Amino acid sequence: MSTLAFFGGDKVRTEPFPAYRVMGEDEQRAAVAVIESGVLSRYLGTWHDDFWGGPRVREFEATWAEQMGCAHALAVNSATSGLYAAIGAAGVGPGDEVIVSPFTMVASATAPLIFNAVPVFADIDPRTYCLSPDSIRARISPRTKAIIVVHLFGQAADMDAIMDIANLHGLIVIEDCAQAPFATRHSRQTGRLGHMGVFSLNYHKHIHTGEGGIVTTDDADLANRVALIRNHAEAVVERMGVTNLVNMIGFNFRLGEIEAAIGLIQLAKGPTLVKQRQANIRYLERKLAGLPGLGLPPVDVGNEHVYYVHALDYDAAATGVPRELLVEALKAELPVTGLREAEGVLIGCGYTRPLYRHPLFRQQIAYGTRSCPFRCPHYEGTVNYAEGLCPNAERAHTRIITHELMRPPMSTTDLDDVAEAFIKVFSRLDALHDHWLRQ
């Protein structure tokens, strides 16, 4: 039995894994064509035909809407901006509450604060790590205005149950699809399961333009309000004839023409890139199946998981080896990935600690020194951000192992090395356990 690299043995692999490169000559030509046109942006922050942006932005939006099967798509400069615009379009404001996930990138939970509303954390489903409908139901109050649902790690939340709850209480549902473009639930794509969807085009997402985002909706009024918030609403509403001025203070959330041109190429590649991820996961999971204490992500019948990362549930009690030690042993067997060398081996413990443990929420200070909006005179509730609030999220934080060693262009040979590292480490759990006891 070979010695683990953690104890000085040979590594499974030393050659770096291939970089996640989804850009090619088509994107290069598209970017050059924009530069040669001389039109890098064509937005005007006033009521004019150019309020809607330049030709590439409009083409990108129309193509996205067609491919995703929605009526409207609005390009923005990031998914964070898209979440802010969607919350504003939903009419969220002071005194309101928005139900959010504690187990996500922080912008999914801070978006309500931008409009002086209070985030209320519901717990996650322990199987999917997405919001639990039962926990949402328990968190609803007379002040609840909206729900932000995160489709985490590439899998859609239980949107049927969530929409039933929302419809019963008259709530707006915003889908955070940053990690789940092209994912489906019962054959319906994310971004069309709620009232609005928000997608990310950040450089490490499935498809990207460097930075950028898209907001989707089938509601024309919500689409117009997102567009207004994106581009200096206060300067536009009068001439546009808008009379509902709620949240009509705008920002500059505009996407440039180069990014939109690249986005058009990336969007066409998206389904193929997703299929490659899914095929890689199927191949890898066949090799990892049966390793003690290692749970593979479940996918319900009729759903499509698109695997932003591969999230594994690790039971240290079943192996006798703490998660952190096991991950260090895995990292010792494997190399870095091209273009991300400074990050080390792309395997890690956990995903994020529950967001309510951040100082912002623990101390309930956002705007100014008077704890607005948490203790704003307009807010008639009290919010709980104490330890133990979301036990499933807290438990997941201590158990999950995530890795990114399945993204295109990882080949079956590359995946064999990933699997061999797992199998090698799990074959020497006894040595790791003894090492842990000696510490």
Image (cartoon, rainbow, N blue to C red):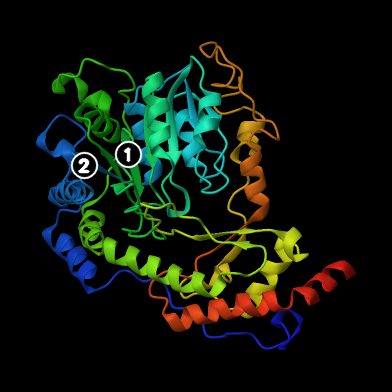
Q: Position of residue 29 (x, y in %)?
A: 18, 69
Q: Residue 323 carries which label?
A: none
Q: Is residue 439 visible?
A: no
Q: In this view, does 72 lie above or below 239?
A: below
Q: What residue type is labelled 2?
A: Cys
Q: Where is residue 347 in the image (x, y as percent from the top left)?
A: 58, 66
Dot 1 or dot 2: first in sequence order is 2
Of 239 and 89, the residue lying toward us: 89
Secondary structure under tag 2 reads loop
| Residue ID at (26%, 29%) | 222
| Residue ID at (66%, 39%) | 391
| Residue ID at (19%, 30%) | 220
Quadrant of the rendering where the C terminus is positioned: bottom right
| Residue ID at (62%, 32%) | 361
Distance from the alpha carbon under mark 1 to that under mark 2 = 10 Å
Could you classify mark 1 by the number of other residues whose Cα lies within 10 Å: few (under 14), some (14-19), or many (20 or more)? many
Could you classify mark 2 by the number of other residues whose Cα lies within 10 Å: few (under 14), some (14-19), or many (20 or more)? some
Q: Is residue 102 above or below residue 120?
A: below
Assess whether mark 2 and mark 1 are in contact (beta carbons under 8 angstroms): no
Q: In this view, does 393 lie to the left or right of 201?
A: right
Q: Where is residue 293 in the image (x, y as percent from the top left)?
A: 67, 63
Of 170 and 108, the residue lying toward us: 170
Residue at numbered disc 2: 70
**Quadrant hosting residue 294:** bottom right
Secondary structure under tag 1 reads loop
Q: Residue 193 carries which label?
A: 1
Q: In this view, does 321 lie to the left or right of 239?
A: right
Of 41 and 284, the residue lying toward us: 284
Q: Where is residue 59 in the image (x, y as percent from the top left)?
A: 14, 50
